Amino acid sequence: MSEYDLASLSDLLACPECQGQLLVTIESLVCTERMCRLSFPVRERIPVLLTDEAELLEEANWHSVVGDRAVDSGTARSVGEIETGADEENEL
């Protein structure tokens, strides 16, 4: 599988730890969730999506890889909770 093939599959892949989106790099697949920050190796062009094989990236290193694609699940959850509350009020 080439780097191009991994990139075309990225929408189908999810982090096995938190189910966050994975960003394809040359050597790894990196979770975009700030609380997770796992980097999964790609060996012989095959992604190894095992949490035991993953490396926890320091936040600065993780942010330099994912950049604007970073997701803060705490913020996303807060927004979701607010939206859910608004929807429940509309149903009443």
Image: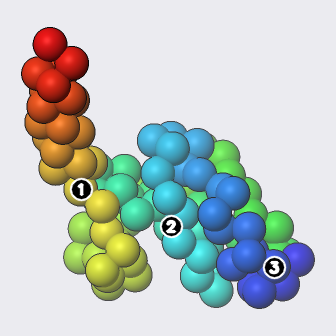
Contact check, label 2 and label 3, Cβ < 8 Å: no
Q: Amino acid at mark 2?
A: Val
Location of residue 68 by image quarter = bottom left
Query: Residue at label 3?
Result: 5
Residue 36, image x and y in percent? Answer: 37, 50
Q: Quadrant of the N terminus?
A: bottom right
Q: In the rendered structure, which disc, 2 or 3, sits on the residue that comes first in sequence? A: 3
Q: Secondary structure at mark 3?
A: helix
In the drawing, what numbered circle is on residue 72?
Answer: 1
Q: CA distance from mark 2 to mark 3?
A: 16 Å
Location of residue 67 by image quarter = bottom left
Residue 89, image x and y in percent? Answer: 11, 21
Q: Secondary structure at mark 2?
A: strand
Count residues near mark 1 (Cα–Cα under 10 Å), then give few for <14, some for 14-19, many for 20+: few
Query: Residue at label 2?
Result: 30
- Relative to the observer, which residue lies in front, 66 or 75? 75
In the rendered image of this protein, does residue 73 appear above or below residue 31? above
In the rendered image of this protein, does residue 34 appear above or below residue 61? above
Q: Residue at x 14, y 13 (%)?
A: 92
Whether residue 57 appears in this view of the structure is yes
Which of discs 1 and 2 lies nearer the camera? The answer is 1
